[in-house]
Image (tube, rainbow, N blue to C red):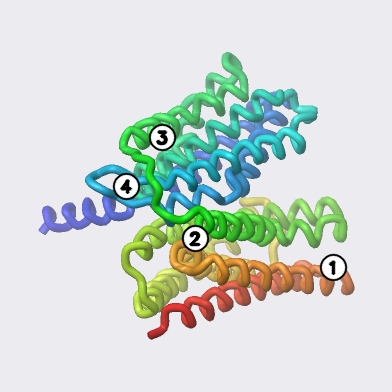
Amino acid sequence: MIYKILKKIKILTYAHSSFLLISIGSLFFFVSNIYAKKFFNTNEFNEWIYIISLLSFFSSFAMMGQDQLLLRFSKIKKKFTIIDKFSLSIIFISLLLFSTISLTLFGKNQMGVSKFEIVLLLMLFSFCRLGYQLRRVNKNFLLAQLSLNGWKLLLICIILLTPIIGVLNLFLFSFGIGILIFLTSILRVQIGALKKKNIIFKYGTSYFLSTGVMAILVYFERFIIEGKIGINEYANFLYFFTISMSIYSILASYFGFKEAIKYKDNFDIAILNRDLSNVLKFLIPISCIWTIMIYFFFPILDMSIDIKSLILVSLIGILKCFYSILSSVMLIKMSYASIIKINLITISLLLLFFLFFNLIAPNINLLLVLIALTWIFRSSLIFFFIKNSFSS
């Protein structure tokens, strides 16, 4: 009996090892931030926060979404990953263009991070992300997540060396795991012509638009409320929103990460409906437990909170998890024309919500309602296009 239980635990651990890695990486990164806040001097902490903000920006925009081309058009043949040569060209052109944009935005910062160091951070992060996509194509999910999030694990292990090597080198060294995985990944890569250039270019354009829309969605609440409420209230809202959304962000990242490859090989509406149903059954108890925990522990977390806001944030979290699955179908299976239509309609909706919010008195709960409506609308829109495209 004990042997069977241990065997089952082992199987479950292996099957969900990538989720464990995402969770551990998030926890370690959280602890690293607490350590930096407590023990770094002012200059070190300012540089730390600035580099983290750079990496956050890179994670949203690096390669302008063109790395998704690897996921859609690469093929596996005799243990080798076949990459379309035109896709690869677009990826590296986008990376060079994004480097120029990054230098324009951040090159004259007052934190002491030089232009060369900004480009170096961008390149190392981008290579880790490419290693992540290549390993996803090979269905090696653990190494994929290690390539993308391994720096968070290594960061906490070497953070005590900060007085010796400095904050910047701390981050540069932490990318070592991801770079190693990237280098081992390209050993099994072959370059070929898999699709017509015009098709790849059209999908590249649609992925670029999707990346921009997603960045707006992620930072939507900050765009429309900043400057409309007091600085302290704004800071408290961001802290509350970030902490409350943390578990949903981890789950959404995991769902989207795993389902994309599954849908590439096998997809129909019945599979999607089953997956959405299973996710809902999983999220309802998790969401209830998490909401209760946040509500009762908010004095320890030093948060200002009300139950209406907490329930709305939980709803937004569940919707983001649903969206991560629908988004996987959109990026892997839908036509570039449908992707562009969905994004243009979403942009129009966001503009309407922005205008509406500016016409009324600022209200946190109303803002959360608008965010929830945005996720509902975009998810419903994607599902509508999927159903029209794949229903027999």
Q: CA distance from mark 1 to mark 4?
A: 46 Å
State the CA–CA distance, disc 3 to disc 1: 46 Å
Drawn side of residue 208 relative to residue 266, left or right: right
Residue farthest to the bottom, as pictured: 392
Q: Amino acid at mark 1?
A: Pro
Task: Identify the disc placed on residue 252.
Answer: 2
Looking at marks 1 and 4 on the same chain, the residue that comes earlier in the sequence is marked by 4
Residue 29 on image: x %, y %: 53, 40
Q: Which residue is mark 3?
A: 182
For marks 3 and 4 on the same chain, the one whose residue lies earlier in the sequence: 4
Let me know if residue 37 appears in the view.
no
Identity of the residue drawn at 50% across and 29% down: 174
Cα distance in 3D space between marks 2 and 3: 24 Å
Q: Which mark is residue 140?
A: 4
**Residue position marked by numbered label 1 in the rendering:** 362
Cα–Cα span, label 1 and label 2: 29 Å
Please tell me which residue is depicted at 44% across the width and 34% down the height of the picture: 178
Mark closer to the chain start, 3 or 1: 3
Under circle 2, the secondary element is: helix
Q: Nearer the viewer, residue 192 or 144?
A: 192
Q: Which mark sits nearer the N-terminus, 2 or 4?
A: 4
276, above or below 210, in the image: below
Query: Of the residues shown, which amino acid type is indicated by label 3?
Result: Phe
Label 2, label 4: how many angstroms apart (C-alpha)? Answer: 19 Å
Given this view, does label 1 or label 2 mark the residue nearer the observer? 2
* Residue most extreme to the top: 164
Instruction: Give, as a three-letter code, the residue at label 4.
Output: Asn
> What is the crowding at mark 3: few (fewer than 14 residues within 10 Å), some, or many (at least 20)?
many
Residue 248: x and y in percent read 52, 60
**Residue 273 occupies which quadrant of the picture?**
bottom left
Q: Nearer the viewer, mark 2 or mark 3?
A: 3
